[in-house]
Image (cartoon, rainbow, N blue to C red):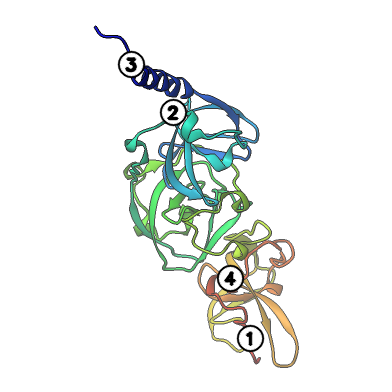
Amino acid sequence: MGAFTPWLLFAVLFSQSAIAAIKPYIPTEAEYNTECKTCPRSLCPNQLYYGYYDPLNVTCWTHGTEIMGDDLWLKSEAGCYITQYDVLEYDGDYTTDLAYCGRASEIQELTLAPATLVYKTECRICPEINCDVVAYLNEDTDLDLTCWYPDGQLIIDDPFWLKTTNNCYIARKNLYLSTVPSLPDLDNCGPVPLLEIANHNNENGTSEVNKRADLGAMYLINVTVGEEYAYCRSCAAERCEVEKTYEFNEEVWLQCLENANYANGTSEWWSLTTDFCYMVNTDFWESPQGDYYRMPACERFEGDESGSPDDE
């Protein structure tokens, strides 16, 4: 065998140096509550999640959903993917210090099922009523659902929530019963941490961040009638047609609030019920605009900042 030439020797040394530069893993910590997913896409189910400053080792890098302007994702030693944005800043370059996870890592595989909303619904970044609102959706909105979560905020009598392709969660109770998908047809969403839009705005958002509720809004709350008879009307004014009559101490479920401003300069609060008619709030034992001050305004769902009757 002939002797190494200087060029061949340089090539071998360079190759060995490049291989040595690739690390088997890099230790880091989660900077925010974050999901670790089965693929590097925001719609993929969660395998687990990390809380603030939880330690983890990342073993390779790939590309996925753009989160806050960054589409680089890292594979945890647990075998799931976390966005680079959600870990502490690294004094280096993951794309040169770690191996590429491979083209197969960028493939998104989702289960999908159609459904339709029966009520006005807040689609939230996580399945709890204190999570940020991503979008306000009207009744009869058609959705594509990707996975289900069994332990969300109890809405009336149902703790199940489902994730939409807009990357937010809706309560199963808000769907037409005839359109509720069979859960075995969808993935389990996996564990979900408390998330914040400020740290997790991404390309799947359905509304501007500044349209979210500043306080965790509530919906489908129940109140009781405090009058002998209470009338549910076609619009939020006494002049409107009576569509339903409730009796004393009868339970009523509410969707949203409307502040009716009248031509004589007075105003009063009304609530839209799940029967899609309006009741004046003074007919209830509770005060929805007070006791339930975080209940959403109906105008958020309509995109109309006025929407109040102009006469009485």
When asked about the image quadrant of residue 296, the answer is: bottom right
Marks 2 and 3 close (CB-CB < 8 Å): no
Q: CA distance from mark 2 to mark 1?
A: 60 Å
Task: Kindly identify which numbered label has been placed on residue 5.
Answer: 3
- Count residues near mark 1 (Cα–Cα under 10 Å), then give few for <14, some for 14-19, many for 20+: some
- Comparing labels 2 and 3, the label whose residue is closer to the camera: 3
Q: CA distance from mark 2 to mark 4?
A: 40 Å
Task: Kindly identify which numbered label has been placed on residue 238.
Answer: 1
Q: Is residue 131 left or right of residue 43?
A: right
Q: Position of residue 218 (x, y in %)?
A: 62, 58
Can residue 41 be seen by looking at this rendering? no
Q: Amino acid at mark 1?
A: Glu
Can residue 168 be seen by looking at this rendering? yes
Residue pictured at 39% horizontal, 53% vertical = 145
N-terminal of the pair, mark 2 or mark 3, is 3
SS at badge 3: loop
SS at badge 4: helix
Q: Position of residue 204 (x, y in %)?
A: 46, 56
- Residue picked out by circle 2: 79
N-terminal of the pair, mark 2 or mark 4, is 2
| Along the line of sight, the residue nearer the viewer: 136 or 209 | 209
- Count residues near mark 2 (Cα–Cα under 10 Å), then give few for <14, some for 14-19, many for 20+: some
| Along the line of sight, the residue nearer the viewer: 17 or 175 | 17
SS at badge 2: loop
Residue pictured at 53% horizontal, 62% vertical = 135
Question: Relative to residue 298, is residue 310 depicted above or below?
Answer: below
Q: Amino acid at mark 2?
A: Gly
Q: Residue furthest left?
A: 1
When asked about the image quadrant of residue 267, the answer is: bottom right
| Placement of the N terminus among the 4 image quadrants | top left
